Amino acid sequence: MKLAIMQPYLFPYLGYFQLMHAVDSFVVYDDVNFIKGGWINRNNILCNGNRQLITLPLLATSPNKLINQIEISSQHKILQSIQQNYRKAPHFESIYPLLESILRYESRNLADFLDFQLRSICAQLDLRPKWHTSSALGKNCELRGQDKVLAICEELGATEYINLPGGKVLYGPQAFASHGLKLSFIEPRAVSYQQFGNGFLPNLSIIDVMMFNDKEQCAKLLQEYDLG
């Protein structure tokens, strides 16, 4: 069984969903410390050919709090930014209601919101990994880093652990092999698609991918990676 474990991000880039495509089971890592300045509550969309940062405002954030201990402020202008920048995109009419349902989700708990968001986008993209939440698992919560990941893999019966390229500095194949696990990484390929006639701007939020690509095109983009 192929397994991935990732912190929940706000409207992640295509590679995050390519990782989901590559696995059988996915764990939302909601009981690790919040990282300020990361992608948990922000991402980039297209604005006049440039990147524009959208941010989900949070209350009383701290690196000493877990992601599932943080609350969202009800005041933000993300939907307004999406409307302004994508209203002329070819798939705005079909994708905007999905984003609206996500951003109007009632829970103010950050982890709950991000979990709902990821599930909703996966449904749109026809991604159906078996879903787990880290805080609901029975692993030893005193474990950290690689040891915690290995414990989750053992609990869920994984045979292969797959991560994004950034994980290469965090995980060693020998440690995984000693637990009977294969360690692999996906390498997203360079992709491009038509935006608004300007030069292509890569690695934006999945919002951008869905606004400019229909379901069939999205399905092809989700397979544009190498595994090794």
Image (cartoon, rainbow, N blue to C red):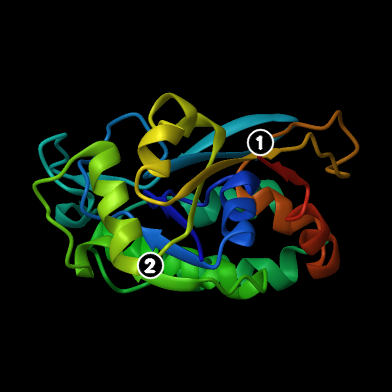
Residue found at the far top of this picture: 169
Residue type at numbered disc 1: Asn
State the residue position of label 2.
157
Residue type at numbered disc 2: Gly
Question: How crowded is the residue under tag 1: few (<14 C-alpha within 10 Å), some, or many (20+)?
Answer: some
Give the camera-side residue of 35 and 76.
Answer: 35
Q: Nearer the viewer, mark 2 or mark 1?
A: 2
Residue 211 position in % (x across, y down): 73, 57
> Taking 126 as reference, is 155 above or below it?
above
Residue 191 position in % (x across, y down): 81, 39
Q: Is residue 189 shown left or right of residue 78?
A: right
Question: How crowded is the residue under tag 2: few (<14 C-alpha within 10 Å), some, or many (20+)?
Answer: few
Q: For the point 91% across and 37% down, which residue is it? A: 197
Residue 72 position in % (x across, y down): 25, 55
Give the camera-side residue of 22 and 175.
Answer: 175
Is residue 135 visible in the rendered structure shown here? yes
Query: Which disc is residue 3 wearing?
Result: none
Q: For the point 60% across and 55% down, which residue is it? A: 17
Give the camera-side residue of 72 and 139.
Answer: 139
